[in-house]
Amino acid sequence: MFMGQYEHSIDAKGRTIIPVKYRDDLGETFVVTRGLDGCLFLYPQNEWQNFVDKLQQLPSNQNTRKIQRQFLSKAMEVTLDKQGRILIPALLRKEAALEKEIAFVGMMNRVEVWDKTRLMEQESQEDDEALEITMDELDISL
């Protein structure tokens, strides 16, 4: 299970070090794709396959195609190099505005990759009271 937050930099070529805590669970080769809220998603192969299987089971309609296109058209396999780095493709770096400082956020079955500033902005918009109401609606207690 992925959890925690780690900060690293990304170089001009788009290479970044994957946090050591995530490497075993991600595996040597994994999938990077466009995420939600302005980040990228990293999926281990087995979790990616589970996700793709769910997408294939959806009814064929315009909304389904939009969802499939959102994630599948930008998905790419990446492989760790000997230094524990990956190359994030330019198209995906642009999608997530990854420039210099980035953050990896563990999200149970996947990892989110954020521009550090964008993540801080996202977190500053979060409202604890609204979160508590949402948790109550979903019957999540602490």
Image (cartoon, rainbow, N blue to C red):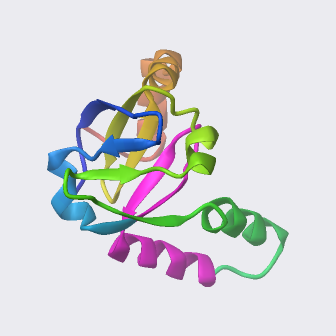
Judge by depth and name the residue closer to the eye, 106 or 33: 33
The foreground one among 45 and 91 is 91
Residue at point 43% right, 71% down? Answer: 48
Q: Residue furthest right?
A: 62
Is residue 30 shown left or right of residue 127? left
Which residue is located at x 58 percent, y 32 percent? 97
Image vertical order of residue 19 relative to residue 6, above or below:
below
- Does residue 134 appear to the left or right of 104 in the view shown? right
Quarter of the rendering containing residue 37: top right
* Magenta span contains residue 124: no
| Residue 134 location (% of width, % of height) | 48, 36
**In the picture, residue 16 is in which quadrant?**
top left
Q: Is residue 32 magenta?
A: yes
Residue 37 visible in the snapshot: no
Residue located farthest toward the front when viewing the structure as drawn: 13
* Residue 36 horizontal/vertical position (percent): 58, 45
Asked whether residue 22 is in view, the answer is yes
Figure quadrant of the N terminus: bottom left
> Please, is residue 10 above or below residue 31 in the view?
above
Percent coordinates x, y for residue 62 in the rendering: 84, 70
Looking at the picture, does residue 138 appear above or below residue 45? above
Classify 133 as above or below 74: above
Say left or right for 43 vs 21.
right
Q: Residue at x 53, y 77 (%)?
A: 52
Quarter of the image for residue 100 reads top left
Q: Residue at x 21, y 63 (%)?
A: 25
Q: Where is residue 17 in the image (x, y as percent from the top left)?
A: 28, 43
Q: What stretch is highlighted in magenta?
A: 31-57
